[in-house]
Image: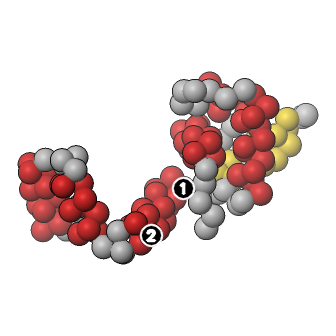
């Protein structure tokens, strides 16, 4: 799976939120800064080439539908992220956030409870 650029990820977030739709629909729910219509349309065409969305023509415009669920993308992204930056160790990932004080002891305890309860 190809990694998405920040611009592509922002577009996918709008597409996932909408479920399906037209470029104008995605502009309405796109996170700030909202790109110009033509930029978003080009980004979505790139996403189609990469296999993340499918399109079909409705009149003289295209309707787009995501081909990958957001949860599946997050899972693949995080697995690659941990592999590339944390030696494929989730312990190293959590340790990094603990050292950077980005996670509290209470949050760590909650994570431990989740692991112990199989959630």
Query: Would residue 10 be found to the left or right of residue 46 on screen?
Result: left
- Which structural element holds mark 1? loop
Seen at 61% across and 50% down, the residue is 5
Q: Nearer the viewer, residue 33 or 29?
A: 33
Relative vertical location of residue 82 with respect to residue 70 in this rendering, above or below: below
View extreme (right): residue: 60
Q: Position of residue 31 (x, y in %)?
A: 54, 30
Seen at 65% across and 32% down, the residue is 26
Q: Position of residue 91 (x, y in %)?
A: 23, 69
* Quadrant in the rendering for residue 59: top right
The alpha-carbon separation of the residues under discs 2 and 1 comes to 23 Å
* Quadrant in the rendering for residue 78: bottom left
Which image quadrant: the C terminus?
A: bottom left
Say which residue label 1 marks.
69
Q: Position of residue 85 (x, y in %)?
A: 40, 66
Relative vertical location of residue 76 with respect to residue 9 in this rendering, above or below: below
Of tags 2 and 1, the one toward the viewer is 2
Residue 75 in view (yes/no):
no
Q: Position of residue 76 (x, y in %)?
A: 48, 65
Query: Would residue 81 be found to the left or right of residue 2 on screen?
Result: left
View extreme (front): residue: 100
Relative vertical location of residue 6 with respect to residue 24 in this rendering, above or below: below
Say which residue label 2 marks.
84
Which image quadrant: the N terminus?
A: bottom right
Relative vertical location of residue 54 with respect to residue 18 in this rendering, above or below: below
Residue 46 in view (yes/no):
yes
């Amino acid at each position: 799976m190809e990694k998405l650029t920040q611009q592509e990820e922002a577009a996918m977030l709008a597409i996932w939120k909408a479920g399906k739709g037209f470029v104008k629909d995605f502009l309405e729910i796109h996170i700030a800064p909202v790109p110009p219509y033509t930029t978003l349309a080009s980004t979505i065409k790139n996403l189609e080439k990469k296999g993340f969305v499918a399109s079909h023509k409705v009149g003289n415009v295209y309707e787009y539908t995501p081909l990958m669920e957001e949860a599946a993308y997050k899972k693949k992204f995080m697995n690659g992220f941990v592999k590339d930056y944390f030696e494929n160790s989730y312990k190293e990932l959590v340790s990094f956030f603990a050292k950077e004080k980005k996670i509290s002891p209470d949050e760590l305890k909650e994570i431990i409870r989740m692991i112990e309860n199989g959630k």
